[in-house]
Image (cartoon, grey):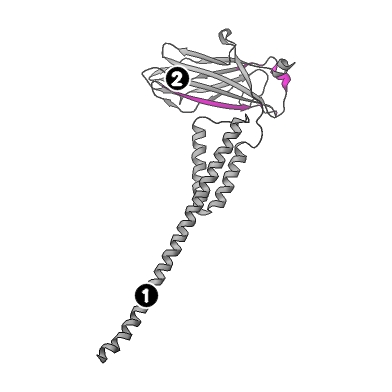
């Protein structure tokens, strides 16, 4: 019994040391749970910031102060690039950087009221219309042309072309070219052919391209609107093994000065 009594204090001491050793992992686990709760709180804050950003953007659209919208492949690339940057900010700098990023996005998306846009009117075949549609009936390819402009330290012209492939073959733009010729404005590439994007449009599908050009003088001159004609020519398109004939549309800009006078 004396031997047993001697061993009992030693056993109690070992148990105390074991309990002390277990308290350290428990403390670490408690800290880990605290960190996880902190991260969850930060992600909740991020979700709230993104929700507020979405609400602010929606209110701007509803109020009529619309941000310029970008369409096509360039817009998709921009969205992906921004998403990747947000992911990097979250990984490296946390929520404060994300909050700054959201505010920068709101400021960058609509930094100021965009200049007022005015329409060009197509005058082919006495159309006098804002959208001009032409169909290559032999190859079953449709084209829809639009154009608009703004005065923003010189004229800035936007041209959109929509291609509809109703044939059984693929439509190829990789050898296509476009020329924009202005009577009164000196664009950087005025009256010169430039390559179109290398789009591939399968049968029964539609795709589009958009061009933006600005005159090199860099000053507003409404007098040049009078008598202005914009001639847009595309060529070099191919559907299957067949070359498509060129298409030309002539645009005349609306003059808001005359309309308001």
Q: CA distance from mark 1 to mark 2?
A: 76 Å
Which mark lies nearer to you, 1 or 2? 1
Image-based side of 27 in relation to 55, left or right = left
In magenta stretch: residue 155: no
The residue that appears at 60% across and 43% down in the rendered structure is: 104
Q: Is residue 149 visible?
A: yes
Camera-side residue of 234 and 101: 101
Q: Secondary structure at mark 2?
A: strand
The residue that appears at 68% across and 19% down in the rendered structure is: 184
Image-based side of 210 in relation to 182, left or right = left
On screen, 245 above or below 40? Answer: above
What residue range appears in magenta?
205-230
The disc, 1 or 2, on the residue closer to the chain's N-terminal end is: 1
In magenta stretch: residue 214: yes
Tally the marks. Answer: 2
Query: Where the N terminus falls, by quadrant?
Result: bottom left
Residue matched to label 2: 164
Residue 162: x and y in percent read 49, 21
The residue that appears at 69% across and 27% down in the rendered structure is: 154
Image-based side of 215 in relation to 171, left or right = right
On screen, 155 above or below 25? Answer: above
The residue that appears at 56% across and 38% down in the rendered structure is: 55
Neighbours of disc 2 within 10 Å: few (<14), some (14-19), many (20+) = many
Q: Secondary structure at mark 1?
A: helix
Residue matched to label 1: 19
Q: Which mark is residue 148?
A: none
């Amino acid at each position: 019994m004396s031997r047993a009594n001697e061993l009992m204090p030693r056993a109690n001491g070992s148990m105390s040391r074991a309990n002390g050793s277990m308290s350290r992992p428990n403390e670490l686990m408690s800290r880990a749970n605290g960190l996880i709760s902190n991260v969850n709180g930060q992600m909740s804050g991020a979700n709230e910031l993104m929700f507020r950003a979405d609400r602010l953007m929606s209110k701007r659209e509803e109020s009529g102060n619309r941000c310029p919208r970008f369409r096509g492949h360039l817009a998709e690339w921009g969205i992906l690039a921004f998403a990747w940057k947000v992911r990097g900010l979250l990984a490296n700098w946390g929520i404060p950087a994300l909050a700054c990023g959201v505010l920068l996005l709101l400021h960058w998306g609509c930094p100021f009221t965009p200049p007022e846009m005015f329409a060009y009117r197509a005058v082919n075949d006495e159309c006098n219309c804002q959208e001009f549609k032409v169909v290559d009936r032999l190859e079953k390819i449709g084209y829809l042309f639009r154009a608009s402009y703004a005065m923003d330290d010189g004229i800035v012209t936007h041209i959109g072309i929509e291609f509809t492939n109703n044939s059984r073959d693929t439509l190829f733009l990789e050898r296509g070219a476009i020329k924009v010729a202005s009577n009164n404005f000196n664009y950087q590439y005025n009256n010169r052919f430039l390559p179109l994007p290398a789009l591939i449009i399968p049968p029964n599908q539609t795709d589009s391209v958009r061009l933006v050009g600005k005159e090199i003088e860099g000053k507003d001159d409404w007098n040049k609107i009078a008598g202005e004609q914009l001639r847009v020519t595309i060529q070099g398109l191919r559907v299957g093994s067949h070359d498509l004939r060129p298409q030309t549309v002539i645009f005349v800009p609306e003059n808001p000065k005359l309309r308001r006078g």
